[in-house]
Image: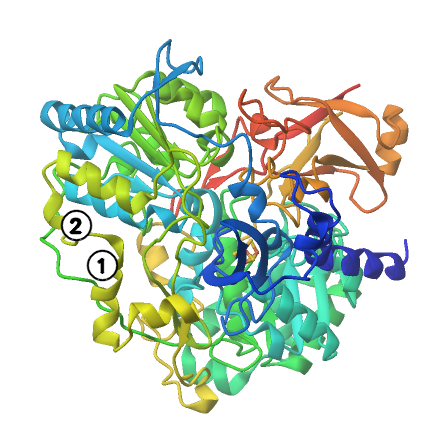
Amino acid sequence: MSNHFNRRQFIKIAGMGSAAAGLAASGMNPWGWPANALAGSLGSDVQVIPTFCELCFWKCGINAKVRDGKIIKLEGHPKHPLSNGRLCPRGNGGTGLTYDPDRLKKPLMRVQKRGEDVFREVSWEDALDFTAEKMLDIKAKHTADCLALFNHGYGATFIKTLLMAYGTHSIAAPSYAQCRGPREVGFELTFGEEVLSPERTDIKNSRMLVLIGSHLGENMHNTQVQEFADAMANGAKLVVVDPRHSVAAGKADWYLPIKPGTDIALLLAWMNVLISEELYDKEYVEQHTYGFEQLKQHVKSYTPEKVWKITGIRPALIRATAREMGHQKPAVLIHPGRHVTWYGDDTQRSRAIAILNALVGSWGRKGGFFYPGELDVPMPELPKFPPMTKKRADLQLKDYPLAFSTLASGLCDATFPAPQAECQLKGWFVYGTNLFFSLPKPEQTREALQHLEFVAVSDVLPMEIVGWADVVLPDATYLERYDDLHVGHYRDPFIALRQPVIEPLYDTRPPWWVSKELAKRLDVADYFPWDNIEDYLQQRLTPMGIKLSDLKKDGVKVFPRQALYFEDGVQPEFYTDSGKIELYSAKLASYGHDPIPVFTDHGDPPEGYFRLLFGRAPVHTFGRTTNNRVLNRVIDTNHVWINRRIAEQWGIKNGQMIRLQNQDGAITNEIAAKVTERIRHDCVYMTHGFGHKAKGLTNKKGASDSDLITRYNTDPIMGGTGMNVNFVTFVV
Ligand code: SF4
């Protein structure tokens, strides 16, 4: 396998942005507009309306081109700090969501058993009256905290305000316990601050980038990928640690095909080399860290020779990469990753990444982690939210004192009767998250739904979770609505406006409207003290000296850059107990956890089984976009990567349709095999988000990894769900 091939692959995938736009431009657009309308020859009757994207959570600035009330092109907003004039491949295809013929078009109410996915169309009046009646009933019978909100995306802002005003504290986004929570807790314990989203990673100035299980290029967050390309063009060194030869690995100076589940051992071995060869940033460590001597003692036993046997990475390779880190410090970025819920010891893994960054002195330094710009945009005065009446619902069965946010999986658990529970959840309000794809153990989610007295779902598409609703509130897409202002804290602080570029299609409504209407019915209208959304936005903008009419034209207001690094004036302050970067955490020790990360063996697959790994397709966001007809012109299904030697043993040919079955007998739809040397023999890999079964969705191609996540290990520190603990075999 040559690097040349993979470099080309990288370029190919990185170029999919224009490919997606190009396909839309080719005359194959599904809504049948003339090809030249999308090809850039736009006439003077074209309106350009700025807003920001929501095909993923990155929120890049968009210029939408609209003619005769139809969106004909989306482009990156040139002044928006997260897009810099470009969108990622998904962002270009955003019209595929708005013009998806499968969209939910009218409010619906269930007419058969819950889960049978049979509804009748109703008016908004009836849908909202019913929702409010059920919510008030739960509040009267069980208290407001017994209604949970599961949410994803920026559209949830007003819905969250509504639910807090109603009185519940059971509000969770799966992006915490099922995605980046362990990273935020691990970094907070070490530096006293989170990595944040978008990540404060100074990729473009990095001289050495270490990606450990992070798939930049497939994980297509626009600004990061732009900066990754800049860093590579500037000659930055790249280390990729991954059981799979990813797109990024094709660019790597060093590729380390690690045994899955052994990252902590490698991270400790790197620390061993940096410390024993005195290559770490001594001045930085002396000035800013706490617990160096304990760390030095702790990593002594993690020699490259010992760790070779654990990880499969040769000692020479461990030493060479550690020495390069020592050479390039402090502009070395050991990337914190994003989806980091893998084995259950994920907070410790993230802490090991944080500690390694501290040793090379990259936190607060150019080419490492910058300090994001600050901007205070006051919220309008609102009445106080009601206090919590019961123990936090997600922590009733097991307490995680370091879980800084609510655990979505904990809320699912709290829906089952348990003797020690103060509050069994009785209602779910689900906004913008298909819980069958975002929570582990889909069977448990199904069972939980049957215990509920009330389920409301608001979404754009008829996802699997919609089929389980009692009432469905069809959402306007991000191109059809106002949302709250986005106050961005990146290198340059900014305020961005989301505004409708067209009127909502069908009988859909934006979440601000739904929230305000429900607030009237729930007797909490005081929390929405404005006549319409434009009044609200102007109320927020006035203290900043900004007119809404100007922001509607410009889309974004960028404020002056502040100091980014210690060297240009940021005061090194660490909000930890010791006031220093904590290499040793007394707080963790006080809760009975390892104060410094320790490697734990996660075992090998049983005979005939392979560890299931999953990740992202570069043009899709989880299962949210896999029905998008524009994006599906590029990628419309997934494959399972199987090592060539293993495939030969099983007689599986490249492209052959097979099924995967896990250790508990769960089995997937058919999926095509991708037979390749680019993955280790002990694991298989597939992209997440395909294999839909919802009857209202057109694209059901591929298989869903979620069907196979019947087990997880819970992170003992913050309650995250480590899901890479499932093993699969092939059904051929
Ligand atoms: S990264 Fe892509 S999909 Fe996400 S907000 Fe930006 S343009 Fe949209």
Specify which label sits upstream in the sequence, 2 or 1.
2
Q: Is 579 situated left or right of 313 in this image?
A: left
Please state the horizontal and vertical placement of residue 119, each as a whole percent of the image: 39, 16
Secondary structure of the residue carrying tag 2 is: loop
Structural crowding at the residue carrying mark 2, measured as other residues with C-alpha within 10 Å and reported as few (<14), some (14–19) or many (≥20) = many
Picture quarter containing residue 397?
Answer: top left
Q: Amino acid at mark 2?
A: Phe
Picture quarter containing residue 232?
Answer: bottom right
Please state the horizontal and vertical placement of residue 548, each as a whole percent of the image: 30, 68
Asked whether the beta carbons under mark 2 and mark 1 sit within 8 Å of each other, the answer is yes
Q: Which residue is mark 1?
A: 536
Picture quarter containing residue 625?
Answer: top right
For the residue pair 495 and 322, the one nearer the viewer reads as 495
Outermost residue toward the bottom in this view: 568
Please state the horizontal and vertical placement of residue 460, each as a whole percent of the image: 45, 36
Q: Which residue is mark 2?
A: 528
Residue 466, placed above or below residue 99 = above
| Distance Cα–Cα, label 2 vs label 1 | 9 Å
Residue 520, placed above or below residue 21 = above
Please state the horizontal and vertical placement of residue 142, each as a whole percent of the image: 14, 25
Q: Quadrant of ligand 1?
A: bottom right
